[in-house]
Amino acid sequence: MGDDHRAFLDATLPYVDVVYQVARHAAGAGQEPEDLVQETYLRAYAAFGSYRGENTRAWLAAICLNTARSEARRRRRRPWEVPAQALLDALPRGRVDSGGAVPDVADVVIAGLDAEAVSRCLALLPEPQRVCIVLMDVAGYTARETAEALGCPRGTVLARVHRGRRRLAQMLAEAGVAHGRS
Amino acid sequence: MDGHDRLLAAFLAGDLDPATARRWDDHLLECGRCWQAVRENRAGCQAAELLRQPAPAGLGDRVRFAVELAAAGSASRRQPGHGVRLRWRWLAGAGALALGLAVALLVVLLPGGRASMPAAVAAVARYAKMVPPPARQHEPGPGGRTVPVEVGRPVTLTAGGQRIVVRTWRLGGTEAVVAVSGRPFAMPPGAQGASGGGMAWSARVGKLGLYCINGRTSELVAAAVPVADLAGLAARLPPA
């Protein structure tokens, strides 16, 4: 196995940036994305012998998501304290009456984007939609790669990402309207 | 999601055949609801793209090191005769079990018996052994005093569930690795209590000397110098 780890690193290290994009949004509270990336690579290395090498990017994404889930399960057994204010901050503000004329959702979203708000709203999406958006729009996976990583049909991925994007845009618009950006 | 939305998702993904796609183009000109859905889809996509962020510098090095560490660990765990056939393993295993139990008891019970090296200490020692020796003697600083110079970037490791930040310093002709962690570094077998306050210990691993001060922030210094010189060397390095 002397050179196994070199072959593994040659095959996988070019994707460390992509895995990091996934890890940033898959890591749970109290888990560092860098630690998740490292754990992903260690698990991938342990399984490298049985890997058939079809799509390394998708394979790494699947391992990263599974690792994040198992870490979240492990942490759930130990209660994690979240300050109440942090939870409140994570929620977009409620829609306010803007005087009859409701501004176009897409215009509000594009006009007032900031990454922190996007990140907060993304975290509020149902997990299947959020994961599809992270893989496709943030990490740059194709729909086929995303389907492979998640083990579901490509059509399901397209449907989830469509619904998720729309919901994300709507949440951002609501937050933008509440903050007076219209 | 109804069939209409599913078709719209397929249209946006470019999955429809040309004739159906043309019909959808025409439909979008007339249907305000679908046009709104398209605009929301694009806005959501653009918003999510904002979240792309380059990986931190050094993450690749960290991953490479962790994998190399795992590879070295699995190689050292491998026994001679690893490839023997399964039935021989069963036969050998039965005999080895009794012998193994006896050896384990001896390791635990005999004073000075070899226990395993704590994972965090082993990781730092392995990292220190990988640091190449200095190419040339370091020039003294102003006033003839040798000043420590950091080599490379800090590297973050996780070993045995312990998060460790490792920095490498060059002081004169010596390379010293300084590992800092929020958790104490467990004493390896053969370590001795050392001066330095708190829970200090020193040990030797091959040519490498280890000196550790455990406290609220624990610091482990590893360098190829005599153990007796490590406390002095640690005092000349910048504080963690």
Image (spheres, rainbow, N blue to C red):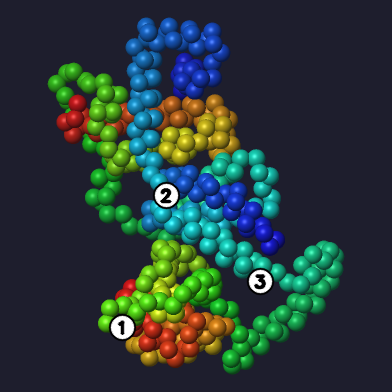
Q: Nearer the viewer, mark 3 or mark 2?
A: 2
Q: Label 3: which residue?
A: B76
- Assess disc 1: are there few (<14), some (14-19) or many (≥20) residues with their C-alpha within 10 Å of its C-alpha: few
CA gap between label 3 and label 2 equals 32 Å
- Assess disc 2: are there few (<14), some (14-19) or many (≥20) residues with their C-alpha within 10 Å of its C-alpha: some
**Element carrying mark 1:** helix
Please determine whether, in this image, residue B75 is positioned above or below residue A28.
below
CA gap between label 1 and label 3 equals 45 Å
Q: Identify the mark nearer the N-term, 1 or 3.
A: 3
Q: Position of residue A58 (x, y in %)?
A: 56, 41
Q: Amino acid at mark 1?
A: Gly
CA gap between label 1 and label 2 equals 41 Å
Q: Is residue A74 left or right of residue B92?
A: left
Q: Amino acid at mark 3?
A: Ser
**Element carrying mark 2:** loop
Q: Does the residue at mark 1 contact the one at mark 2 (Cβ under 8 Å)?
A: no
Q: Label 1: which residue?
A: B144
Please determine whether, in this image, residue A158 is positioned above or below residue B153.
above
The picture quadrant where one finds residue B146 is bottom left
Q: Residue at the location (44% across, 44% down)?
A: A21
Q: Position of residue A152 (x, y in %)?
A: 57, 34
Q: Does the residue at mark 1 contact the one at mark 3 (Cβ under 8 Å)?
A: no
Q: Position of residue A45 (x, y in %)?
A: 61, 55
Q: Label 2: which residue?
A: B55
